[in-house]
Amino acid sequence: MLLNEASLKSIQRYCVHNRALLDESSAARCVHCGASFAPTDIAEYTAVEHEQTRDTARCPKCGDRSVLPSAAPIMLDARTLEALQRYWFSGKR
């Protein structure tokens, strides 16, 4: 699956305020470290920026807020994960 820049940007919305979607998911994956885990393994939810609601998951492996729920309408295969990692974390945007 080849993703353009707009698609890569839009996927990020599933990494914030994702607690409800994680409740519907059977698995989750961290874009930052690549770890796969059960949503029940998530021990920490945090608020984003200046918000009060703590509904954004932190990865139980690396602590980053780049957790994608399996219930998100995207196919998170190895190529997509690699493209997301390059786009979000390489500093070359």
Image (spheres, rainbow, N blue to C red):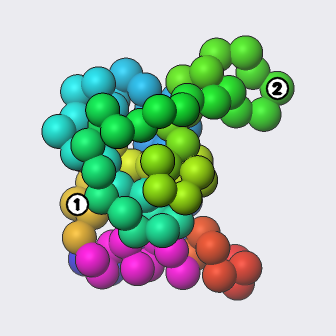
Compared across the picture, whether 35 is left or right of 75 comes to right
Q: Residue at x 73, y 15 (%)?
A: 52
Q: Disc 1 marks which residue?
A: 75
* Circle 2 SS class: loop
Query: Residue 44: x and y, percent?
Result: 54, 32
Question: Would you say residue 82 is visible in this rendering?
Answer: yes
Which quadrant is home to the N terminus?
bottom left
- The amino acid marked with disc number 1 is Met
Question: Which quarter of the figure has residue 41?
Answer: top left
Query: Residue 50: x and y, percent?
Result: 82, 26
Relative to 82, is 15 above or below?
Answer: above
Query: Residue 23: x and y, percent?
Result: 29, 24
Question: Would you say residue 4 is visible in this rendering?
Answer: no
- The amino acid marked with disc number 2 is His
Q: Which mark is residue 50?
A: 2
Instruction: Please rate how many residues cluster around mark 1, counting C-alpha atoms within 10 Å: few if below 14, some from 14 to 19, many from 20.
Output: few
Compared across the picture, whether 76 is left or right of 10 comes to left
Q: Residue at x 70, y 32 (%)?
A: 48
Residue 57 among magenta residues = no
Question: Which quarter of the figure has residue 92?
Answer: bottom right
Residue 84 among magenta residues = yes
> Residue at the top extreme?
52
Report the span colored magenta.
Answer: 78-86
Instruction: In this rendered view, identify the residue nearer to me: 87 or 69.
Output: 69
> Residue at the left extreme?
26
Query: Residue 58: x and y, percent?
Result: 54, 43
